[in-house]
Every structure is written in C-alpha cells, then in structure tokens.
Amino acid sequence: MKGTFPVSRFQALETPFYYYDTQLLRHTLTCVRTECAKYSKYAVHYAVKANANPKLLAIIRESGLGADCVSGGEIRAAIQAGMPPQGIVFAGVGKADWEINLGLSHHIFCFNVESVPELEIIDELAGKQNTIAQVALRINPDVGAHTHANITTGLKENKFGINLNDLDMVLDKTSALKHVRLVGLHFHIGSQILDMNDFVSLCNRINEIQEHLYNRRIIVDHINVGGGLGVDYQHPNRQSVPDFASYFATFHKHLRLRPKQFVHFEPGRSIVAQCGSLISRVLYVKQGANKQFAILDAGMTDLIRPALYQAYHKIENLTSEESMEKYDVVGPICESSDVFGKAVDLNKARRGDLIAIRSAGAYGEIMASGYNCRPLPKGYTSEDFL
C-alpha cells in the first residue's frame, strides 16, 4: 500500500524536496508522552542531529520534549525553536571552546562529558564565567548492539565515552574540580536498535556501574540511557509509530534505580523518521545490458544513507498505477554509490513520474550536501498544503 501524499500539489514544486507529515509527527509525539508518563521521573530529550528543520523543531518543542545536542549549532537551533535551556543536554566527543561557552552562557542542563581533557576544559571555562557546569560522565559500557557497524557507539573500540577501566580515576578527578558538579551518568550504545535485549544488556551494565558507585558512596541524580530505538523501514505504513511501549517498559523492568533518580532518554530517529519522505522525479528510464534504471533528480547529496550505510528505504511511484517492473533506482551524482535501491519493484516508471523515498525524516535533510555544486533540498510540511 502506498502512502498518502498531496500528489497534485507536488506537481508544481521543484524536485527534489522533503515532505513531512506533521499529523503523523504529532501522533508519534503523543505516543512518546503517553508511554513515558506511565513511569515517574522519566524525561525525554529529542536528538536534534536526526533533523533540525525549524518547523519540526517547533512542533517537538510544543510537545514538551527537551533537546539532545551534539554541537553548538544544534544548541542554537534548539534555543531558536523555543526549547528551554534547562531541557538541553550537550553530548559529543569533540566540543570546541566556543560551543562549551555557548552552553555555559545559556545555563543548559548538562554536559555529557567524554574524556578527562574535556572535563578539565569545561571546568576552566566555567571558572572564567564564574559558574558551575553540571556534568554527566558518558561511560563506554562495552555493550554491543545488533545494528550497522557505523552506528554502533557502545563498544570499547568506539571513540565515544570514558573507558570503564578509567572510571575511578575520572570520578576522583571530577571531585577535585571546583567548577563542575557531577549530576549523572550517560550511555549510548547505537542507533536503529530493534532488539530489546540490547537495551536489557545496557541496563545490566548500568546496574553494575551503579553498584560500584554506591560502594564508593556516590549516588548521582540522573541516569541518561541515550537513544537508539529503531523504526520499520520495510513497512512504513504498517508500523508508522515505533514500539515506544516496549522501549520504556524494558528500562522500567530492568534498570535498578536509586530513590529519586531520574531517567533520561534521547530518541531522534524514532520520532521523525517515518513522517518524512524525499520526493523526486524520474529524469530518464534507461535500459541497461541486463536491467533497467530509473534515474532520479534526487541523489546521494539529498539522502546519503543508502550510500553510507547500505540502508534500505521503501520506494514508491506516486503517479503510476501500471504493472510492477524492476528497476535499479539511482541518482545523477557522478559516483557509483549513488544508488537508492537495486531490483526495486515499482509501478512502471516514465519520465516525470513522482517518486517517494519513504522513512527519510531522520538523517535525510540534515545530512544533505552540496557535492557536485547541487542546491540543498527544501523541506515542506503537510501544513504548507492546507
């Protein structure tokens, strides 16, 4: 079954562009709030890196979510969208001084710290501003996730987080600094995770670490478990909203918290992926030696995930009801990796047909580039067509 799109309104627009179904986005946010509210002391911060389109950020801000940022630019985007600084957490393995100063000047909730040198710089810069920076130590839990290697972040060979073997040394260092206050622990094991057992493994490791801290008479106020919940790229209509019920319930069941501790989540993809589609036109249908190609005006500059991660996206011909044929769906970029899908079943394609590449709301528009001197794609919402 194809998705529902205002195809007649699309005809007048220059392609490629991103289209966001804001009704679905709002429904997804309602599900997040409903499931999260079943448990006390749960807080959700939207991962801005998934999509920073200002119209989407405004809707997410209206839902009451905080922001998980990994750059100074994302902090600015969150604040410009009206998100309160006290709901902003700032992660990232390489925070520049100006980014740290920006967070300090806005009195954001927390810096998720990934190394001793970073901790020392935050302390130094906070001292110059005569303030105290709240920090959470991002621990590398050495927990694997059943996902693509490029989006696994919780193994000891990954660049992220503090090695478990260094935890005691970092705790000692933190307690000796005058302008930082340890308020939490932060974890993130990867993205596009569909197996809840991966999150169970994370909970078990956090429980071990919490017990170690307790033996040192340390109890932090906040446990940040990151994000990572995946979406159904194969069936975006059948499962348009991810399984937030199982996600939050898994942590409630397996994470052993101390009294008064808050749990923080940082979903990104699971909130915005399914509401977005990349809309393109067929430029040419080309017959190859043993296959045919549908050549689009969208390319890897507009949606890099298939080229970068070999990611699957469902592809639909919005303007044809003819019988199905197989195509390699490709873009115009001068790279052999500029392929959206091979042997894709599409209704018979002709020049000018509108093509929707589904589940592209996360890591689509935000990762677009100007390679080949191509313009960046525009983003429209369903509300633009009312």
Image (spheres, rainbow, N blue to C red):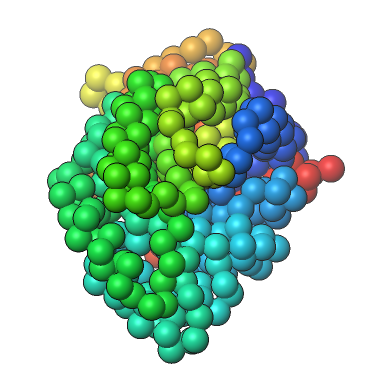
Q: Nearer the viewer, residue 162 or 67?
A: 162
Q: Tell which residue pokes out farthest to the right in this image.
A: 386
Query: Residue at position x 38%, y 78% from top?
Result: 178
In the figure, 229 relative to 126: above or below? above
Q: Position of residue 320 (x, y in %)?
A: 60, 21
Q: Which residue appears at 60% of the width and 40% of the height?
A: 41
Viewer-nearest residue: 222 or 382: 222
Q: Position of residue 143 (x, y in %)?
A: 25, 34
Direction from residue 264 to residue 53 in the image, left or right: right
- Asked if 327 appears above or below 40 in the picture, the reply is above
28 and 179: which one is in front?
179
Which quadrant is home to the C terminus?
Answer: top right
**Residue at the limit of the structure toward the bottom, as seen here:** 128
Instruction: Specify the quadrant of the image occupied by residue 378.
Output: bottom right
Q: Look at 48% across and 75% down and name the residue there.
A: 132
**Tag count in the figure?**
0
Task: Report whether residue 298 is seen.
Answer: no
Residue 37 visible in the snapshot: yes
> Is residue 152 depicted above or below 58 in this figure?
above
18 to 143, vertically: above or below? below
User: Split into 4 quadrants, where in the image is the N terminus?
Assistant: top right
Where residue 20 sits in the image (x, y, percent)?
65, 41
What is the x, y in percent for residue 340?
Answer: 38, 34
Q: Residue at x 24, y 71 (%)?
A: 117
